Image (spheres, rainbow, N blue to C red):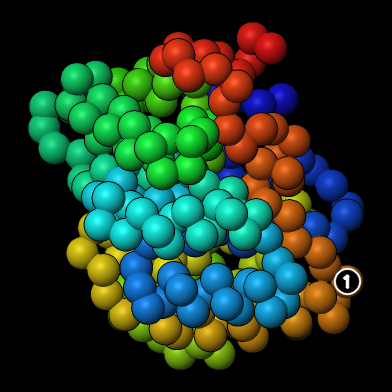
Amino acid sequence: MVQLTGPALWRGPHTKEKVVALTFDDGPNDPDTLNLLGVLARHGVKATFFIVGANAAKNPGRVKQAFDEGHAIGNHSYSHAFLKPLSEPSFEKEIGKTQDVLRGIIGKTPALFRAPWFFRHPAMLRTVRRHGMLHVTGIFGNYWEVFQPSAESMAKTAERKIRPGGIVVFHDGREARGGKRHNSVEAANLLIPRLTARGYRFATLPELLGVSAYQEGQEAGFDILSV
Ligand SMILES: [Zn+2]
């Protein structure tokens, strides 16, 4: 059962099928996002990008490219910061503004949201719900990539943690300020064939969860549970 206001989803439905969703947060962040799209295309893998609105505003073409190449686009706040007061108007500036930016680029309204640092707050969850979005987390594949461990060590960590129905969190950017993520790109390049050799296939996150990536209506308050 998909939940909107309870615990965020950290894995897909219980399944024995070897299917995983690769997700990438904090982009677009070139040249790493551009290179990552090349890696995914070469391996024939569709992934999910949780986009920082401010980064999208600076590089809309890369978001459009990811969308056009079949990857799913989700909302990851505007500035990757939630400033006080932690109230609905304050969250609206981060979440609603990013919806507007993404809608302007891809012509669709995202249905998935991932909070920066998997942040949780009742007013944030209300804002996410008001926008008709589902809050999704995942299993960090490369959280410590802030310190850029080697691609090999990130791929190994992700491979060790992966389970059928798993949601892997990688980063192709760093918050709203960019930063080097080339090791992440290479980690994905190493990980994909290893998981394929173990019998895994790759799905976008909405495919894994059995939900739509985008909302049918444009109106705020569209509730994906009501359809
Ligand atoms: Zn993030």
In the picture, measured across the screen, residue 165 lies left or right of residue 55, that is right
Q: Is residue 20 visible?
A: no
Label 1: how many Cα within 10 Å (few below 14, some 14–19, many 20+): few
State which quadrant residue 199 falls in.
bottom right
Say above or below: 85 vs 160. Answer: above
SS category of the residue bearing label 1? loop
Q: Residue at x 54, y 17 (%)?
A: 217
Q: Position of residue 59 (x, y in %)?
A: 32, 59
Quadrant of the image for the C terminus?
top right
Q: Position of residue 153 (x, y in %)?
A: 53, 86
Q: Position of residue 82 (x, y in %)?
A: 20, 39
Say above or below: 40 vs 50. Answer: below
Foreground residue, 151 or 51? 51
Say above or below: 225 vs 59. Answer: above
Residue corresponding to mark 1: 199
Quadrant of the image for the N terminus?
top right
Q: Amino acid at mark 1?
A: Gly
State which quadrant residue 183 falls in.
bottom left
Q: Residue at x 84, y 60 (%)?
A: 18
State which quadrant residue 71 falls in.
bottom right
Q: Is residue 216 visible?
A: yes
